[in-house]
Amino acid sequence: QVQLVESGGGLVQAGGSLRLSCAASRSGASFSVMAWYRQASGEQRELVAAIYAGGQIKYADFVEGRFTISSNKAKSAVYLQMDSLKPEDTAVYYCHAVAGYRYWGQGTQVTVSS
């Protein structure tokens, strides 16, 4: 069983930056995709960004060039650099990875004040 552990959330003012990190409890795990999702209060969980084993990257439209996803395959880790944050980016951010089974992290709160 693999666990995903997130870190890096917090409170930031609008226009600020945060960097989220997610590492698998077992390094060297081979994931076909690693991604970040978010869920705002009262809303459905939505994809933010995904990075595939072949190197392809996908971003949600609302990212608008403000976020950058990256990964470290050796560490089975994925990162999300978030710049130019907006109050509407406030949500719990979840790490997600697929290796036959779909794994989820516990979530990390990101709050952007206006």
Image: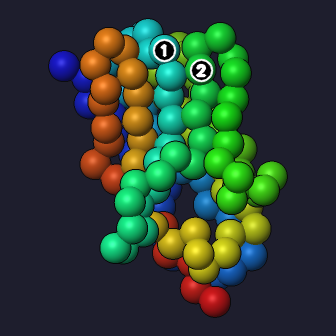
Please name whichever residue, 64 or 31, is drawn nearer the observer in this view of the structure: 64
Mark 1 and mark 2: span between their CA atoms? Answer: 6 Å
Q: Position of residue 87 (x, y in %)?
A: 60, 79
The quadrant in which the N terminus is found is top left
Q: Badges 1 and 2: C-beta atoms under 8 Å apart?
A: yes
Three-letter code, disc 2: Tyr
Residue indicated by mark 2: 52
Residue visible at 70% across and 21% down?
56
Task: Say left or right for 80 vs 27.
Answer: right
Identity of the residue furthest to the bottom in this view: 114
At which x and y percent is residue 104?
A: 31, 38
Q: Which residue is mark 1?
A: 32
Nearer-the-camera pick, 62 or 91: 62
Q: Which disc, if any, is residue 88?
A: none
Q: Quadrant of the C terminus?
A: bottom right
Q: Quadrant of residue 58?
A: top right
SS class of the residue under badge 1?
loop
Instruction: Give neighbour class at mark 1: few <14, some 14-19, many 20+ (Cα, 10 Å).
Output: few
Q: Crowding at label 2, few (<14), some or many (≥20) Cα neighbours within 10 Å?
A: some
Residue 48 location (% of width, % of height): 57, 48
